[in-house]
Image (spheres, grey):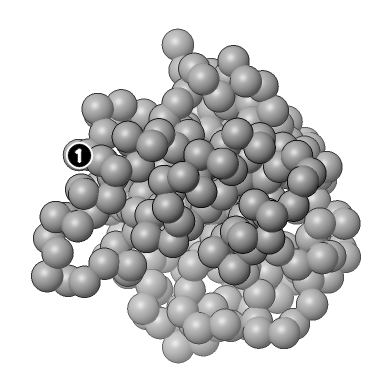
Amino acid sequence: MHNLINLHDAKSIAAHRPIMIAHRGGVVAAGAPENSLRALELAAQQGYDMVELDLRRAKDGVPVLLHGYGSRGSMWVDCGVAANIEDFTSAELAGITYRGTDQSVVTFEAALALCRQLKLGIMLDIKTPDSAPLSTPYLARITALLEQYELTDAIMTLCTRPEARQLLPSTTLWPIRARTLQAALDGEQSLHGHFWFDDPASATDEQIRQLSQRGALTIACLNSFRYPHHSFNTLERVDAERMKAVPVDGFQIDSQYGEFFEKLA
Protein backbone atom coordinates (compact mmCIF):
# COMPACT_ATOMS: atom_id res chain seq x y z
CA MET A 1 0.00 0.00 0.00
CA HIS A 2 1.33 3.43 -0.94
CA ASN A 3 1.99 5.67 2.08
CA LEU A 4 2.74 9.37 2.26
CA ILE A 5 6.49 9.84 2.26
CA ASN A 6 8.22 11.17 5.38
CA LEU A 7 11.35 13.01 4.24
CA HIS A 8 12.76 12.88 7.77
CA ASP A 9 12.50 9.13 8.25
CA ALA A 10 15.15 6.87 6.74
CA LYS A 11 12.82 3.87 6.52
CA SER A 12 10.18 5.88 4.68
CA ILE A 13 12.76 7.23 2.23
CA ALA A 14 14.11 3.74 1.61
CA ALA A 15 10.61 2.38 1.01
CA HIS A 16 9.94 5.03 -1.64
CA ARG A 17 13.37 5.06 -3.32
CA PRO A 18 13.70 6.08 -6.06
CA ILE A 19 11.51 8.98 -4.96
CA MET A 20 9.62 10.06 -8.06
CA ILE A 21 8.49 13.70 -8.29
CA ALA A 22 6.23 14.88 -11.10
CA HIS A 23 7.44 18.18 -12.59
CA ARG A 24 4.97 21.04 -13.14
CA GLY A 25 2.16 19.78 -10.99
CA GLY A 26 1.64 16.20 -12.02
CA VAL A 27 1.32 14.09 -15.13
CA VAL A 28 0.54 16.27 -18.14
CA ALA A 29 -1.71 14.57 -20.68
CA ALA A 30 -4.72 15.26 -22.88
CA GLY A 31 -7.27 16.93 -20.63
CA ALA A 32 -4.75 17.15 -17.78
CA PRO A 33 -2.78 20.41 -18.02
CA GLU A 34 0.11 21.13 -15.68
CA ASN A 35 -0.84 22.08 -12.11
CA SER A 36 -4.42 20.86 -12.55
CA LEU A 37 -6.32 18.54 -10.25
CA ARG A 38 -6.51 15.97 -13.03
CA ALA A 39 -2.70 16.04 -13.41
CA LEU A 40 -2.38 15.33 -9.68
CA GLU A 41 -4.76 12.39 -9.95
CA LEU A 42 -2.75 10.93 -12.83
CA ALA A 43 0.49 11.33 -10.88
CA ALA A 44 -0.91 9.24 -8.03
CA GLN A 45 -2.33 6.65 -10.42
CA GLN A 46 1.01 6.24 -12.16
CA GLY A 47 3.04 5.77 -8.98
CA TYR A 48 4.66 9.14 -8.25
CA ASP A 49 5.54 9.87 -4.63
CA MET A 50 5.53 13.67 -4.85
CA VAL A 51 4.51 16.51 -7.13
CA GLU A 52 6.10 19.87 -7.81
CA LEU A 53 3.53 22.63 -7.34
CA ASP A 54 4.10 26.04 -8.95
CA LEU A 55 2.67 28.69 -6.64
CA ARG A 56 1.59 32.18 -7.62
CA ARG A 57 -0.08 34.85 -5.50
CA ALA A 58 -3.56 35.87 -6.65
CA LYS A 59 -4.81 39.45 -6.33
CA ASP A 60 -6.49 38.66 -3.00
CA GLY A 61 -3.31 37.14 -1.54
CA VAL A 62 -4.44 33.53 -1.95
CA PRO A 63 -1.79 31.07 -3.21
CA VAL A 64 -2.90 29.41 -6.44
CA LEU A 65 -1.35 26.94 -8.86
CA LEU A 66 -0.04 28.19 -12.19
CA HIS A 67 3.39 28.08 -13.76
CA GLY A 68 2.73 31.00 -16.07
CA TYR A 69 5.28 32.75 -18.25
CA GLY A 70 7.62 35.54 -17.30
CA SER A 71 8.23 36.87 -13.82
CA ARG A 72 4.63 38.04 -13.44
CA GLY A 73 2.95 34.85 -14.58
CA SER A 74 1.38 35.62 -17.95
CA MET A 75 -1.70 33.47 -18.53
CA TRP A 76 -1.80 33.75 -22.31
CA VAL A 77 -0.12 30.46 -23.24
CA ASP A 78 -1.92 28.33 -20.66
CA CYS A 79 -5.34 29.93 -20.58
CA GLY A 80 -5.61 32.29 -23.55
CA VAL A 81 -6.04 35.24 -21.22
CA ALA A 82 -4.04 38.38 -22.02
CA ALA A 83 -3.28 39.20 -18.39
CA ASN A 84 -1.14 38.10 -15.46
CA ILE A 85 -2.31 35.85 -12.67
CA GLU A 86 -1.94 38.63 -10.09
CA ASP A 87 -4.66 40.58 -11.93
CA PHE A 88 -7.37 38.18 -10.71
CA THR A 89 -8.71 37.09 -7.35
CA SER A 90 -8.74 33.40 -6.52
CA ALA A 91 -12.52 33.33 -7.05
CA GLU A 92 -12.13 34.85 -10.51
CA LEU A 93 -9.37 32.39 -11.38
CA ALA A 94 -11.65 29.49 -10.47
CA GLY A 95 -13.73 30.47 -13.50
CA ILE A 96 -10.77 30.42 -15.89
CA THR A 97 -9.92 27.12 -17.56
CA TYR A 98 -6.78 25.92 -19.29
CA ARG A 99 -7.16 26.08 -23.05
CA GLY A 100 -8.73 22.98 -24.58
CA THR A 101 -9.71 21.45 -21.22
CA ASP A 102 -12.35 21.65 -18.51
CA GLN A 103 -9.67 22.08 -15.82
CA SER A 104 -9.67 25.43 -14.01
CA VAL A 105 -6.93 27.27 -12.16
CA VAL A 106 -7.05 25.90 -8.60
CA THR A 107 -6.06 27.17 -5.19
CA PHE A 108 -3.13 25.78 -3.26
CA GLU A 109 -5.60 24.62 -0.63
CA ALA A 110 -7.61 22.56 -3.12
CA ALA A 111 -4.40 20.99 -4.41
CA LEU A 112 -3.18 20.16 -0.90
CA ALA A 113 -6.49 18.58 0.04
CA LEU A 114 -6.20 16.30 -2.98
CA CYS A 115 -2.50 15.59 -2.39
CA ARG A 116 -3.24 14.55 1.17
CA GLN A 117 -6.02 12.27 -0.05
CA LEU A 118 -3.75 10.78 -2.72
CA LYS A 119 -0.74 10.60 -0.34
CA LEU A 120 1.50 12.78 -2.48
CA GLY A 121 4.37 14.76 -0.99
CA ILE A 122 5.05 18.32 -2.13
CA MET A 123 7.93 20.12 -3.84
CA LEU A 124 7.14 23.84 -3.63
CA ASP A 125 8.24 26.25 -6.34
CA ILE A 126 7.13 29.61 -4.99
CA LYS A 127 7.21 32.01 -7.92
CA THR A 128 7.30 35.77 -7.53
CA PRO A 129 7.94 38.82 -9.71
CA ASP A 130 11.62 39.72 -10.01
CA SER A 131 12.99 41.35 -6.84
CA ALA A 132 9.52 41.50 -5.24
CA PRO A 133 9.55 40.36 -1.61
CA LEU A 134 7.49 37.42 -0.45
CA SER A 135 4.98 38.89 1.96
CA THR A 136 4.72 37.58 5.50
CA PRO A 137 0.92 36.98 5.32
CA TYR A 138 1.35 35.05 2.06
CA LEU A 139 4.05 32.77 3.43
CA ALA A 140 2.17 32.35 6.70
CA ARG A 141 -0.87 31.26 4.71
CA ILE A 142 1.18 28.67 2.83
CA THR A 143 2.58 27.33 6.10
CA ALA A 144 -0.83 27.19 7.75
CA LEU A 145 -2.23 25.17 4.86
CA LEU A 146 0.66 22.70 4.95
CA GLU A 147 0.05 22.23 8.65
CA GLN A 148 -3.72 21.94 8.21
CA TYR A 149 -3.34 19.10 5.72
CA GLU A 150 -0.56 17.42 7.74
CA LEU A 151 2.01 17.56 4.98
CA THR A 152 4.85 19.22 6.87
CA ASP A 153 7.02 16.07 6.92
CA ALA A 154 6.60 15.61 3.18
CA ILE A 155 7.72 18.98 1.80
CA MET A 156 10.77 20.40 0.09
CA THR A 157 11.10 23.75 -1.66
CA LEU A 158 13.07 25.23 -4.53
CA CYS A 159 12.74 28.69 -2.98
CA THR A 160 15.87 30.13 -1.37
CA ARG A 161 14.50 33.48 -0.22
CA PRO A 162 15.52 34.30 3.39
CA GLU A 163 11.95 35.24 4.26
CA ALA A 164 10.82 31.78 3.17
CA ARG A 165 13.40 30.18 5.46
CA GLN A 166 11.99 32.17 8.35
CA LEU A 167 8.32 31.39 7.76
CA LEU A 168 7.94 28.02 6.05
CA PRO A 169 7.67 24.97 8.34
CA SER A 170 10.89 24.02 10.14
CA THR A 171 10.63 20.57 8.53
CA THR A 172 11.05 21.99 5.01
CA LEU A 173 14.01 20.60 3.03
CA TRP A 174 16.14 23.30 1.37
CA PRO A 175 17.89 23.01 -2.00
CA ILE A 176 21.56 22.72 -2.89
CA ARG A 177 21.97 23.93 -6.47
CA ALA A 178 24.99 24.24 -8.78
CA ARG A 179 25.90 27.68 -7.43
CA THR A 180 25.98 26.42 -3.82
CA LEU A 181 27.27 22.91 -4.44
CA GLN A 182 30.96 23.51 -3.77
CA ALA A 183 30.26 25.59 -0.66
CA ALA A 184 28.14 22.75 0.71
CA LEU A 185 30.92 20.24 0.05
CA ASP A 186 33.60 22.50 1.52
CA GLY A 187 31.70 23.01 4.78
CA GLU A 188 31.94 20.65 7.70
CA GLN A 189 28.36 20.78 8.93
CA SER A 190 25.78 18.06 8.38
CA LEU A 191 23.62 18.47 5.28
CA HIS A 192 20.53 16.90 6.85
CA GLY A 193 17.56 19.09 6.04
CA HIS A 194 18.90 19.79 2.55
CA PHE A 195 18.60 18.14 -0.84
CA TRP A 196 20.77 18.34 -3.92
CA PHE A 197 18.56 19.24 -6.89
CA ASP A 198 19.90 19.86 -10.38
CA ASP A 199 20.37 18.37 -13.81
CA PRO A 200 22.83 15.46 -14.00
CA ALA A 201 25.46 17.47 -15.89
CA SER A 202 25.83 19.90 -12.99
CA ALA A 203 27.62 17.47 -10.65
CA THR A 204 30.01 14.54 -10.81
CA ASP A 205 29.07 11.13 -9.48
CA GLU A 206 31.57 11.60 -6.65
CA GLN A 207 30.13 14.97 -5.65
CA ILE A 208 26.65 13.46 -5.48
CA ARG A 209 27.93 10.59 -3.34
CA GLN A 210 29.66 13.04 -0.99
CA LEU A 211 26.45 15.01 -0.57
CA SER A 212 24.59 11.82 0.27
CA GLN A 213 27.26 10.79 2.78
CA ARG A 214 26.89 14.17 4.47
CA GLY A 215 23.15 13.65 4.92
CA ALA A 216 21.56 15.43 1.95
CA LEU A 217 18.90 13.80 -0.17
CA THR A 218 19.92 13.66 -3.83
CA ILE A 219 17.30 14.43 -6.47
CA ALA A 220 18.23 14.57 -10.17
CA CYS A 221 15.94 16.46 -12.51
CA LEU A 222 15.10 15.42 -16.04
CA ASN A 223 13.22 18.36 -17.53
CA SER A 224 12.54 18.68 -21.24
CA PHE A 225 13.61 22.33 -21.42
CA ARG A 226 17.15 21.28 -20.45
CA TYR A 227 17.63 19.11 -23.53
CA PRO A 228 17.89 19.89 -27.26
CA HIS A 229 14.88 19.10 -29.40
CA HIS A 230 16.90 16.69 -31.50
CA SER A 231 17.57 14.41 -28.51
CA PHE A 232 14.24 12.54 -28.71
CA ASN A 233 14.81 11.08 -25.23
CA THR A 234 18.27 9.70 -26.09
CA LEU A 235 20.33 12.05 -23.93
CA GLU A 236 17.67 11.95 -21.23
CA ARG A 237 17.82 8.17 -21.04
CA VAL A 238 21.61 8.24 -20.71
CA ASP A 239 21.34 10.72 -17.84
CA ALA A 240 18.65 8.66 -16.15
CA GLU A 241 20.76 5.50 -16.29
CA ARG A 242 23.81 7.33 -14.98
CA MET A 243 21.86 8.72 -12.01
CA LYS A 244 20.38 5.31 -11.25
CA ALA A 245 23.90 3.91 -11.10
CA VAL A 246 25.24 6.54 -8.67
CA PRO A 247 22.57 6.03 -7.18
CA VAL A 248 20.55 9.15 -6.37
CA ASP A 249 17.61 9.08 -3.96
CA GLY A 250 15.12 10.21 -6.54
CA PHE A 251 14.16 12.06 -9.69
CA GLN A 252 12.02 15.04 -10.57
CA ILE A 253 10.85 14.45 -14.13
CA ASP A 254 8.54 15.57 -16.87
CA SER A 255 5.99 12.80 -17.22
CA GLN A 256 7.17 12.00 -20.77
CA TYR A 257 10.22 10.38 -19.15
CA GLY A 258 8.19 7.97 -17.04
CA GLU A 259 9.10 5.15 -19.42
CA PHE A 260 12.64 5.19 -17.98
CA PHE A 261 11.43 4.01 -14.58
CA GLU A 262 9.96 0.60 -13.75
CA LYS A 263 8.26 2.12 -10.70
CA LEU A 264 5.89 4.19 -12.81
CA ALA A 265 2.87 2.49 -14.36
Image quarter (top left, top right, bottom left or bottom right) of the N terminus: top left
Quadrant of the rendering where the C terminus is positioned: top left
The reply, left or right, for residue 198 in relation to residue 189 is left
Which residue is painted at 21% across and 71% down in the image?
Answer: 228
Q: Which residue is found at the position 20% from the left and 39% from the top?
A: 259
- Write down the quadrant of residue 159 in the picture: bottom right
For this orientation, the residue located farthest to the top is 1
Q: Is residue 112 visible?
A: no
Is 97 placed above or below 44 here? below
Disc 1 packing (10 Å; few <14; some 14–19; many ≥20): few
Q: Please tell me which residue lies in front, 147 or 14.
A: 14
Residue 116 % position (x, y): 60, 31
Depicted 84 relative to depicted 102: above or below = below
- Residue at image position (78%, 71%) is 134
Q: Measuring from the top left, give residue 168's x and y in whole percent.
A: 80, 51
Whether residue 265 appears in this view of the structure is: yes
Q: Quadrant of residue 125?
A: bottom right
212 versus 224 height, above or below? above
Q: Residue at x 53, y 33 (%)?
A: 120
Residue identified by numbered label 1: 259
